[in-house]
Structure formats: structure tokens, C-alpha cells
Image (cartoon, rainbow, N blue to C red):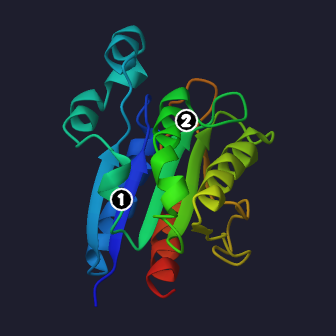
Amino acid sequence: MSKKVSIVFHSVCGNCYLMAREFYDEFKKCGAETQMLRVKDPNYAELAKQFAVAGQYKNEIMDIEEAKAEKLLDSDIIIMGSPTYYGNVSGAMKCFMDSFSPYWTEVAFWGKKLFAYTTAATSEGGADMCLNAINIFGQHMGMIPVPVPSNLLSTQSFPAYGLAHYVGDYSNLRPDRDTVLAIKEMTDRLMNL
């Protein structure tokens, strides 16, 4: 039986989108029924005008269906990705997470696997807190957060809480070879759970 995978992301500068796209492609290669959804961001169009890096993938991102909690109900695996803002998820991702309130009392997401990823300017710790915010949200919904194994890649280590890609002060460092390889390896592991 094929697994149903939902990839939900928020991306302003394109990095979380590029990671979501890698996850999407890898899950499709594994034969999973996969959907990629973006969270609603009412400020995105304006930000894309102000910052060149934000506008680079604007049309591709806006062409992706908007995420709604009910679209994830039949998922076996949920991947959530958010940029790190002040050691937390973005405001748009937090609004999406808050939309799950009606499902909390119904325990509708009990037992679903959750995997988190983030982008952050630097490795000084904010990314870990963002990943924890996603995982704690999932636990409150009854989901099972899946950690990153310490041996995922021999060339790089990642936080146990999820994948983190460091984008630099201007968010212009796109996912590198190790990040793409980590997504591939993590996809294989998630499919084998």
C-alpha cells in the first residue's frame, strides 16, 4: 500500500520552497502519493517586491495550492517546513498551526508521522528552536515527531529535531549538495517506517 505524504511549507526567500520541492520529488520517486501545499501568507506579494531574493520563486510558490488542515487528514506522513524567525516558526506557519484547533479535541491527527525542517540565517541555535516548535505542535496534535539520525550523512551533522539549512544573512545561500542528499536519505528512512 502506498503511503500518503503531505509537504506543507512557508517560504519567503525560496529556500523552504526548494527544500519542499526536493522532498516532493524524492517521495514521488519512492512511489508515495504526495501533495505539496503552501501556507497562506498575506504579506508575500509585498515582500517579493521589496526583496529580490523573495521574488525569485514567487510565481512558482503562488501556483502551489494553499494548505488547509483538513487536506492533511488522510496523510500518513506530514512534512512541515518553515523559515526560522526569532527562534520560532514564521507568523504564517504559526497561523496555519493554530488552524488545527478543531482537530485537537477530535484527536484527528493521532499517530501520523511528522518531520520538520527549517532554514535559518546562522547556526547559532534559532533553527533548533524552530524545529522544536514544529515538533511540539505535532505532539499536541498526537503526531509522532521523527528525529534525524546521527548518521544520516557522514559529511555533515544535523539537529536531531529535523533538517536545518543555513541560508546566510541575506537568505541567498540555496540548498547545497549535502542538504539535497540529506533530504533524499531522510525520505528513504521515512518511507521505511
Q: Is residue 53 left or right of residue 82?
A: left
Task: List x then y, in percent, for residue 8.
Answer: 40, 50
**Nearest to the observer: residue 189 or residue 89:** 89
Residue 22 appears in which quarter of the rendering? bottom left
Q: Which mark is residue 94?
A: 2
Disc 2: CA contacts within 10 A as few (<14), some (14-19) or many (>=20):
some
Q: Secondary structure at mark 1?
A: helix
Q: Which residue is mark 1?
A: 72
Q: Residue drawn at (31%, 81%), measured in percent from left and top?
A: 30
Q: Residue drawn at (49%, 71%), measured in percent from left and top?
A: 112
The kind of residue on which mark 1 rests is Leu
Q: Is residue 35 above or below residue 31?
A: above
Task: List x then y, in percent, for residue 60.
Answer: 23, 37
Q: Secondary structure at mark 2?
A: helix
**Nearest to the observer: residue 163 or residue 70:** 70
Q: Which mark is residue 105?
A: none
